[in-house]
Image (cartoon, grey):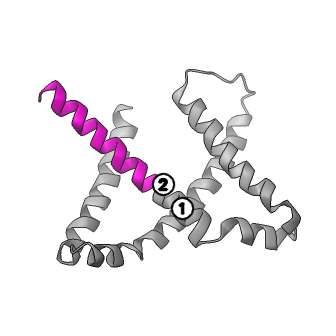
């Protein structure tokens, strides 16, 4: 594969991953009304702007930390605490992604790809499986 082909493939994979994660985040925040529901459960509607700011700042800061080479000197038990928060986030994001699946047939009909819906879903499934295997085995 040529250098240009590798660059284009990498750009396509990055764009596709960004769209998938962005769609999940939008579903997480907008479709499922996670922040208003959490404010309702905790009876803290006056702090809803703080919750929104925490989500935005947390996303920005931890994305930056993920891409940088910064190492945080934390105590060993902090891994469990980070794991609990990461597990909660992934679980809620997975629930939000299932809501996005309901939107896909409507989108496919509107762009004239209704007959290719099964191929589209299988591409998403195999992409997730192969991406996960690649990350676990090689990254």
Of residues 53 and 17, the one nearer the viewer is 53
Q: How many marks?
A: 2
Q: Which mark is residue 22?
A: 2
Residue at the image position 22 percent from the left and 72 percent from the top: 118
Q: Is residue 54 above or below residue 35?
A: above
Q: Who is closer to the viewer here, 90 or 133?
A: 90
On the image, the x and y values in percent for residue 129 come to 33, 53
Marks 2 and 1 sit apart, C-alpha to C-alpha, by 6 Å
Residue 5 visible at all: yes
Image quadrant in which the N terminus is located:
top left
Give yes or no for contact between labels 2 and 1 (Cβ–Cβ under 8 Å): yes
Where residue 34 appears, as percent x and y from the top left, is 67, 67
Q: Give the side of residue 79 with respect to residue 96, left or right.
A: right
Q: Is residue 47 positioned above or below 14 on the image?
A: below
Q: Quadrant of residue 109?
A: bottom left
The answer to whether residue 133 is visible is no
In the image, is residue 6 above or below residue 87? above
Tell me the SS state at disc 2.
helix
Q: Which residue is the site of mark 1?
A: 26
For the C terminus, the quadrant is top left
Would residue 74 appear left or right of 9 to someone viewing this image?
right
Q: Which residues lie in the magenta part? A: 1-21
Label 1: state its secondary structure: helix
Q: Residue at x 27, y 56 (%)?
A: 126
Q: Callout 1: few (<14), some (14-19), or many (20+) C-alpha neighbours within 10 Å?
A: some
Q: Please report the residue visible at 72 percent of the width from the left and 56 percent of the height from the top.
A: 52
Q: Please state the horizontal and vertical placement of residue 137, each as a whole percent of the image.
A: 35, 36
């Amino acid at each position: 594969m040529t250098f240009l082909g590798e660059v284009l493939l990498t750009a396509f994979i990055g764009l596709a991953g960004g769209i998938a994660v962005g769609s999940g985040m939008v579903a997480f925040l907008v479709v499922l009304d996670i922040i208003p529901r959490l404010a309702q459960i905790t009876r803290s509607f006056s702090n809803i702007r703080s919750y929104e700011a925490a989500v935005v700042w947390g996303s920005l800061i931890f994305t930056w930390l993920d891409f940088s080479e910064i190492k945080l000197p934390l105590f060993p038990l902090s891994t469990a605490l980070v794991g609990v928060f990461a597990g909660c986030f992934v679980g809620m994001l997975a629930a939000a992604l299932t809501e996005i699946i309901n939107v896909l047939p409507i989108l496919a009909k509107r762009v004239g790809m209704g007959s290719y819906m099964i191929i589209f879903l299988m591409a998403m499934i195999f992409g997730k499986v192969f991406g996960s295997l690649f990350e676990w085995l090689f990254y």
